[in-house]
Amino acid sequence: MRKTFKVLAVGAIWIAVAAAGGRVPVHEPAVETGLIDNAPFRIDVPANWNGKLIMLMHGYEPAGTPRHLPWPAADETKLFVDAGYAVAQSGYRTQGWAVAEALPDIERLRDYFVKHHGRPKQTYAIGFSLGGLLALATVEREANSYAGALSLCGVNMSGDAVGGLLLRNLAAFDFYFPHVLPKLDAADAPALVGQDVIEAALDKDQNIASRLADALDIRRPALAGAIMLDYLVLQELRSHAGGFPADNQATLYTGFPDDEALNAGIARYRGSPKAIAYLAANAPLSGNIRVPVVLQSNADDPTIPPRYGSLYPAAVRRAGKQKLLTVLPRIGHGHCDFSADRTMAALAQLVEKTR
């Protein structure tokens, strides 16, 4: 594919280019934005660059969300730049479940950085939420180009697992609170069901709502928002994958207030083999890591509940690579609710592991 570079802004003039041997170039502070194959990007390089690059990967962006160009700096950019790191961020060509597009977009941006700003001493893959999945997939695929990865509040599971977990949550909600959600695979299913509509249904039976929240490992006040987001993502996955992305025809669910009744009465869905294969391929996580990986999650995250936290560590153990994995204690409440100090402490853990 032909690469198109459209530089929109350059915040400084380079004084010298890296010489042979991978030395860090001497330069003034720089900010560069543009497009690479229709993927917006941003590069920040501090005057005191330590020679290390962070490929910073953003989370889920619902399809249709208005985009800002030039691509803006993520909230964490200043933290990393002030600490001496260069930061490169891709906005990805597409929105929604953009894993298939994002992974090559990220690598094209890294290649661009090396070509135009010199080869870093070390490169780290760091991602938040869906970006955490991208960071893990990136270092599993491109271990020779990265020193390590940090997933913060990450979707640390393969795409096909995501589809199954979304269906579990939504089908269980529909069993206990029928006629609130449409049939999940209906051709005319809306893209979104409002949080207020879901909350109104939950309010009608607080006892069942609380027990469902416990089963899903989500605090009751956050349950309506979590179901709304699960529904939004499932419908977007249907569109992106070209069919219904999960199958529960033979699934036996456990951990609910009445498993027998739920399994007898829960809605069953036939998945599209093509859609399920698409999710499995984008991106599979084997756990076969070859560089250090650090996971930092929130203690009380309604988007990525704690019950999902064991999936990637289990995959790493199966691959026999547990010595390369560090799972930090859960902290904070809400999704991606980390203080600046906590974020930098997690980065420090990764840097220490890569020495």
Image (cartoon, rainbow, N blue to C red):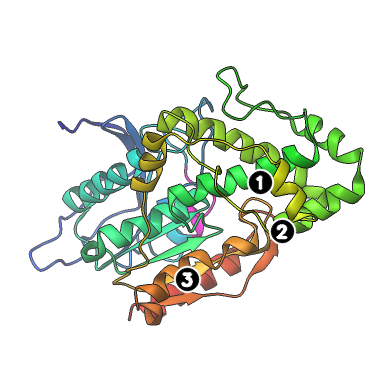
Image-based side of 218 in relation to 96, left or right: right
Which quadrant does the N terminus fall into?
Answer: top left
Residue at (26% x, 32% y) in the render: 37
Residue at (55% x, 75% y) in the render: 328
Residue type marked 1: Asn
Residue type marked 2: Asp
Q: Secondary structure at mark 3?
A: helix
Image-based side of 260 in relation to 49, left or right: right
Q: Mark 1 Cα within 10 Å, few/some/many (few <14, many 20+)?
A: some
Q: Is residue 74 magenta?
A: yes
Depth check, mark 1 against mark 2: the one in front is 1
Q: If you read the primary sequence from the N terminus, does the residue marked by circle 1 or circle 2 appear first?
A: 1
Q: CA distance from mark 1 to mark 2?
A: 10 Å
Image-based side of 176 in relation to 59, left or right: right
Span shown in magenta: 73-79
In the picture, the disc for residue 217 is 2
The residue wearing badge 3 is 313
In terms of depth relative to the viewer, which is nearer, 313 or 325? 313
Q: Mark 2 Cα within 10 Å, few/some/many (few <14, many 20+)?
A: some
| Label 1 close to label 2 by CB (< 8 Å) | no
In terms of depth relative to the viewer, which is nearer, 182 or 273? 273
The residue wearing badge 1 is 169
Q: Is residue 53 magenta?
A: no
Which quadrant does the C terminus fall into?
Answer: bottom left
Would you say residue 226 is visible in this rendering?
no
Q: Secondary structure at mark 1?
A: helix
Residue at (59% x, 63% y) in the render: 340
